[in-house]
Image (cartoon, rainbow, N blue to C red):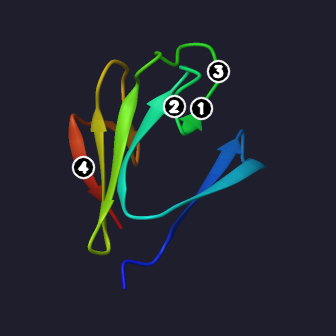
Amino acid sequence: AQGVLEVVLLRDGLLIGTEVFTAGSWLIGSSERAPLRLASKGVEREHARLVFRNGSVVVERLGGPVLVNGYRVEKSELR
């Protein structure tokens, strides 16, 4: 079973929402077609991609900076 991935969205440490995804590749950005739409200043239309497959979660930069634990990354597996 692939399972589901729950993404918790925080702003300044406060919960602003959650999204649930099944296996696949999901666009993160300000575009209306992005399943994970972020309407914050500095978010590109196609900012990053979230790939959830076989229990593994990878985030990769598309157009905007992506930080994982405070470090800029091009691509990173999340745990």
Whether label 2 touches label 1, CB < 8 Å: yes
Q: Which residue is mark 3?
A: 40
N-term mark: 3 or 4: 3
Q: In the rendered image of this protein, does residue 75 appear above or below residue 63?
A: below
72 left or right, relative to 74: right
N-term mark: 4 or 1: 1
Quarter holding the C terminus?
Answer: bottom left
Q: As rendered, which of 58 and 20 lies closer to the eye?
A: 20
**Which numbered disc, 4 or 2, marks the residue closer to the eye?**
2
Q: As rendered, which of 56 and 24 lies closer to the eye?
A: 24
Whether label 4 touches label 2, CB < 8 Å: no
Q: Which residue is mark 1?
A: 37
Q: Which residue is mark 2?
A: 34
Quarter holding the N terminus?
Answer: bottom left
**Which numbered disc, 3 or 1, marks the residue closer to the eye?**
1
The answer for how far apart the CA atoms under marks 2 and 3 are is 14 Å
The answer for how far apart the CA atoms under marks 3 and 1 are is 9 Å
Q: Total label count?
A: 4
Looking at the rendered structure, the secondary structure element under dot 2 is: loop
The answer for how far apart the CA atoms under marks 3 and 4 are is 22 Å
Q: Position of residue 22 (x, y in %)?
A: 46, 64
The answer for how far apart the CA atoms under marks 4 and 1 are is 20 Å
At label 1, the amino acid type is Arg
Q: Which residue is mark 4?
A: 76
Q: Position of residue 65 (x, y in %)?
A: 36, 24
Q: Residue at x 61, y 29 (%)?
A: 38
The answer for how far apart the CA atoms under marks 2 and 1 are is 5 Å
Looking at the rendered structure, the secondary structure element under dot 4 is: strand
